[in-house]
Amino acid sequence: MSIIEELSDIFGEAFKSLDLPRELGNVRTSDRPEMAEFQCNGAMPAAKQAGKNPREIAQAIVEHVQDHPNLKDVSIAGPGFINIFVTNEFLTKYVQDVQLPKLSEGETVILDYGGPNIAKPMHVGHLRTGIIGDTLRRILDKVGFHALGDVHMGDWGTHMGMLMMDYIRTSDESIVMDCNLEDADAVQTLFDDMAERYPKASGAAKENPELMQEARAATVKLQNKEEPFLSMWQKIRDVSIRAMERNYGLLNVRFDLWKGEADVHDLIAPMAERLKQKGFAVQDDGAWVIPVERNDDKKKYPPLILYKSDGGVMYGTTDMATIVERINLYDPSRIIYIVDQRQSLHFEQLFRAVRVSNIVRDDIELTFAGVGTMNGTDGKPFKTRAGGVMRLSDMIEMAQSKALERLNEAHLAQDMSEEEREKIALQVGVAALKFADLQNQRHADYIFDLDRMTNFEGKTGPYLLYQAVRIKSLLRKAAEQGLNIADDASFSIHEEERALALLLTALPDVLTLAVRNYTPHVLCDYVYNLAQTFSSFYGNCHILSEENENVRSSRLKLCNLTLERLEQVFELLGIECPERM
Ligand code: ARG
């Protein structure tokens, strides 16, 4: 149980004793720490239900809990708010034993948060989905789910046919086929070649119907597993995966499954056959579609297209087959898509289509967790100065070199080898990028501001790392001086430390909230609040220089616990913290 849960229990009992619903006793952290540590606002709705005066009800509740050993002070404010302070003993117990919530007994959840197309460089559009998706995977895993992240590459469309035909037309197949995957330089060369070729090939095919026809034919041959297409495709895919692994690796974004659209190709025909037979798919102007409209719709929902009139499959078809595969292989209780918000209509059609056709049981939760875009100062999705799409690798490099500049300005990491400093700059730069992204509401857009996000002050990744490193160095000094850290028996909390102690107990409830709506930003608010609160504690209280042995060792313990909590959140956000800087 978390501290909030235990308090809610106490007040829930009180409401129950008045024949009122238990949930009205729900307690939360106070909005106004100077007035209360916790508050319970159930008296107002209770009064409405019972047709009574809220202050009277609040009074009865207060009388009921008055002598509870965990409560130090309970009072009524305004129309019937109940303000709560807890005892030192109660707080001390919780601070030392914070248990993360267990919200599942290992149910499988699949998270779909990759989506890069192979043969194309990853760009900034892949940043948000990757970072947010990976964090959600870490969070769900931590609270007891069996979370599986799937990269779900776009590896099976006409874009493959266009690219392969381009190599064949220029007699350059050997550039692809001879590439040695173990040689990083060769991999990079081929990757750059594809990145340059693809836009040209695709532009040409769009203008020239003959080329388009060839590209389509090549794609069909690939899908029939014919040579040389299959081998070429495999090479292109492998090289692309190497590049993705590098980008995602730098960002600390991990996947359990490296699957793509191609993996479900063979499931499409039998699935479509069944859908036709059962009458879920109908013919429409030569195409096969699944109608998804409902009577109470306020707007129009176009059907999901299974087969175009030329027999080609669509984005929705592969996504449907992927759901079939995921259910067969992993038996998930939830599938969560962390994808650009602008694809919401596609996912609504998809979810409706798999529900009406009974591909997905009612008890399996399908969620579209849409994400906003990272914009430039013009309010449009971020572009390079030249107006092109910015590669993800360039953006990471930019963040790293800016972080290095910041470290130098702040005279940090100066006594280290260049190599070590570079490594720390990468950690700081990536923390800046990730924290700037994760702190926004998932579906909100935000403006990319490298100066702000790399600052060592403010709500930034570098600020958080700096606070954690400062605690590490303080604890090292304490150890060098042979100072003790309080044990359970000697640990005590004093007035000026209560705000910090209270926050240290709050992580379980924050985590529960982050899971409820798939919103990692609440963890960012929490960790920033914790770092700031620690900072004022550090400014106001003597620690190493404190003369009273009990006070000092208890404060060292609070430092230790703060670091523990910060590191727990860093791990959930996939942020690495240096030992020193
Ligand atoms: N490859 C897609 C794109 O570039 C994103 C895939 C998202 N995931 C999915 N299951 N549809 O837009």
Image (cartoon, rainbow, N blue to C red):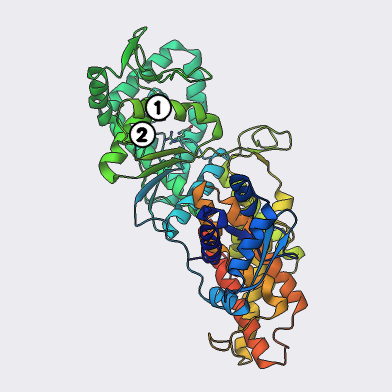
Q: Earlier in the sequence, mark 2 or mark 1?
A: 2
Q: Which is nearer the eye, 443 or 126?
A: 443
Ligand 1 location (quadrant): top left
Q: Quadrant of residue 167?
A: top left
Q: Which amino acid type is shown beneath numbered disc 1? A: Arg
Q: Quadrant of residue 289?
A: top left
Decide if residue 378 is on the left or right side of residue 480.
right
Residue at image coords 61%, 37%: 373
Q: Give the residue at mark 2.
A: 261
Decide if residue 151 is on the left or right side of residue 91.
left
Residue 205 in picture, x, y percent from top left: 46, 18
Q: Which is nearer the eye, 256 or 346?
A: 346
Q: Is residue 527 above or below residue 309?
A: below
Residue 493 in picture, x, y percent from top left: 64, 80
Asked if residue 416 shows in the view, the reply is: no
Q: Secondary structure at mark 1?
A: helix
Asked if residue 269 shows in the view, the reply is: yes
Q: Residues within 10 Å of mark 1 (few under 14, many from 20)?
A: many
Residue at image coords 61%, 64%: 424
- Quarter of the image where the C terminus is located: bottom right
Residue at image coords 76%, 75%: 539
Q: Which amino acid type is shown beneath numbered disc 2? A: Glu
Label 2 or label 1, whichever lies nearer to me, is 1
Q: Is residue 317 above or below residue 337?
A: above
Residue 57 in picture, x, y percent from top left: 64, 56
Residue 394 in picture, x, y percent from top left: 60, 45
Q: Is residue 470 above or below residue 437?
A: below
Instruction: Look at the numbered disc 2 and say if its residue's Cβ is closer than 8 Å to ligand 1.
Output: yes
Q: Secondary structure at mark 2?
A: helix
Q: Give the residue at mark 1.
A: 352
